[in-house]
Image (cartoon, grey):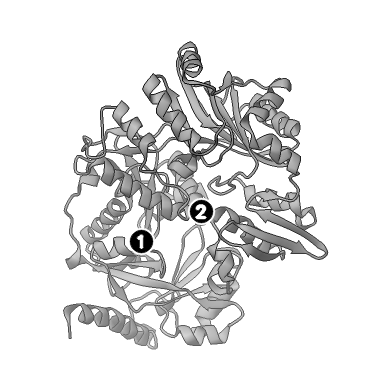
Amino acid sequence: MSKKSHRIEKGYGQSLRNWEKMENPATSRMQPNAFAEMGWGRLVFGHTFENNKRIVDAMCSHGRDTRDIAMYVIDPHVLIAMAPDKLFLDPSHTFRLWHYDHSCKNTEDSRILTIQRLSTRQEADQVNQIYAKCRMKGADPDFLLDQRATKLRTYLVAKPADSDQVVGTITGVDHVAAFNDPENGCSLWSLAVDPQAGVPGVGTCLVRHLAAHYFTKGRAFIDASVMHDNQIAIPLYEKLGFQRVPVFCIKRKNSINQTLYVAEHDTVQQMNPYARLIADEAKQRGIIVDVIDEAYGLFNLSLGSRSITCRESLSEMTSAVAMTKCDDKRLTRNLVARAGIRTPEQIRHEDMDTSIRFMQQQGRVVVKPARGEQGAGISVDISEPGELETAIESAGEICSDILLETYVKGEDLRIIVINHEVVAAAVRKPPAITGTVSHTIRELIEKHNRRRMAATGGESFIPDDAETLRCLNKEGLDYETVLENGRTVVVRKTANLHTGGTIHDVTDEISPALKQAAVTVSQTLDIPVTGLDFMVPDISCDDYAFIEANERPGLANHEPQPTAQRFIDFLFPETVTE
């Protein structure tokens, strides 16, 4: 038998022997019927329960709206058979790291990250924001900060060395504190990394630090439960020395876990994240979803006699005239300017001499196609004739009509308006990478793209094109440059999500004047669902410049704001329960 097979057999065999011990509690050191409150639900230690019925009772009496998990169950098939309407087998793998396989060596990532215990409410709020971005259930900040539970639960957070912003988190559970584990083990949960973190290696550092914390305390192993198709986490655990062990989990059937046990139509899963977000919300309300073309995100929603066709957030409720008003950026600007909305100066490109004079008059300009979406063909902060010519050529590949407008410095603000009400607001930041002294810019961009594409279903990545190279060259850099440790470089000027930009929720921070401007634009264009772009010097002040309107805004990535819910509220108001 191989060493690896022996370890797997040892781990499973020991659990079986512990289960057998439960038949005679007097000989067992384990606390019976043990579970740990986790904030998002309960972690039920199945092998400590006296019999299967007690596990079923524990899982069925709770977990109606939480992520209760029964782990280390010996007879998962029996448990499910006892309550098939309430329980299901979690499609996760369990990975185990033995203390003698753990390497404490430092990596280059540890020099650009600070790992520490969660200790403040601000950190707890930031952790919950990361959970929301990762589609994970959060926990009450007071629960996370409960100092009495520090022996049972350990919360670690990761921050860039030069920032106070949490970019990752992990939770550890000490099995000795939980149920006096004779195997002397522990487990890790809720590993989450901000999909928009510009620092590489966050997950690796968090797992290494948590493992070191427990192995220093003398724990024998650390377990991790991970979804079978998680192609980000599984390679990470394997790289760190974790091995698969035959440990099973049982979960409670509820709306949170529904996607894990209800058959999903293949075509729904094949749609992009923006379409799936809406389809999932519709299905939860009993609305029938029929996919017309998954590649285009085109689907039909029907409830009773009412039927509406959508392409992502663009529905039949948006008229062709409203689409026309948004489609041509010149027309959009003219209409909203007449309504008193502040806009930057703009001209249509006719010839290079005229465009150069306009650029010189304005100082710096933005060049973009009159029609287009997802940031294609847009060049920002152009101030040299050579750059201008290249930018015009790039825009011309998207649309023959090319616009130049005054470059407005400030925050790139996207406001989502549904049914003429502001639903969400987010600052969009251009993509940036942070040096590690060990990676070239090309390698850092590749790492960034892997994280962003995994988090957005392939929708967000930094293009390898002339615009990215122009922005690097402007900083005296190229793809093969190795950045010094901790140095952050913005690799594109545009903040569009589809070209690698990141989104940061500021809904509760924008000024009333900005909200009113957004509503005025939506009413002027007579468009019921839109994403409006503004440049603002400060999101809390009243100054702004309106840039453009999007008739098919992406509703994903605006967590924790209920964009998909409000969209379905608008389409099917009869399903609103509040």
Is residue 387 in sight in this rendering? yes
Instruction: Please name the residue that numbered disc 1 is placed on.
Output: 233
Residue at image point 44% right, 72% down: 34
On the picture, is 354 further left or further right than 333?
Answer: left
What residue occupies the far top of the structure in this picture? 361
Query: Looking at the picture, how far across and down is residue 494, in whole percent?
Result: 45, 33
In the rendered image, the vertical position of residue 286 relative to residue 515, given as above or below = below
In this view, the residue in front, 382 or 134, is: 382
Q: Residue furthest front?
A: 351
Query: What is the count of numbered marks?
Result: 2
* Picture quarter with the N terminus: bottom left
* Of pointers 1 and 2, the one earlier in the residue sequence: 2
Q: CA distance from mark 1 to mark 2?
A: 19 Å
Residue that appears at 51% across and 63% down? 41
Badge 2 density bin: few <14, some 14–19, many ≥20, Cα 10 Å:
many
Q: Which mark is residue 138?
A: 2
What residue is rendered at 48% in x and 50% in y? 459
Please tell me whether mark 2 sits on a helix, a strand or a loop. Answer: loop
Q: What is the number of the mark on residue 114?
A: none
The three-letter amino acid code for the residue at tag 2 is Gly
Q: Quarter of the image holding residue 110?
A: top left
- Residue 71 place in picture, x, y as percent: 42, 73
Residue 33 in the image: x percent, y percent? 45, 75
Depth order, front residue of 552/245: 552
Dot 1 alpha-carbon crowd within 10 angstroms: few under 14, some 14 to 19, many 20 or more: some
Check the image and report above or below for 481 versus 451.
above
Q: Nearer the viewer, mark 1 or mark 2?
A: 1
Q: Nearer the viewer, residue 468 or 519?
A: 468
Point out residue 40 in the picture as x, y percentages from the top left corner: 51, 59
The three-letter amino acid code for the residue at tag 1 is: Ala
Going 52% across and 65% down the picture, which residue do you hit?
Answer: 67
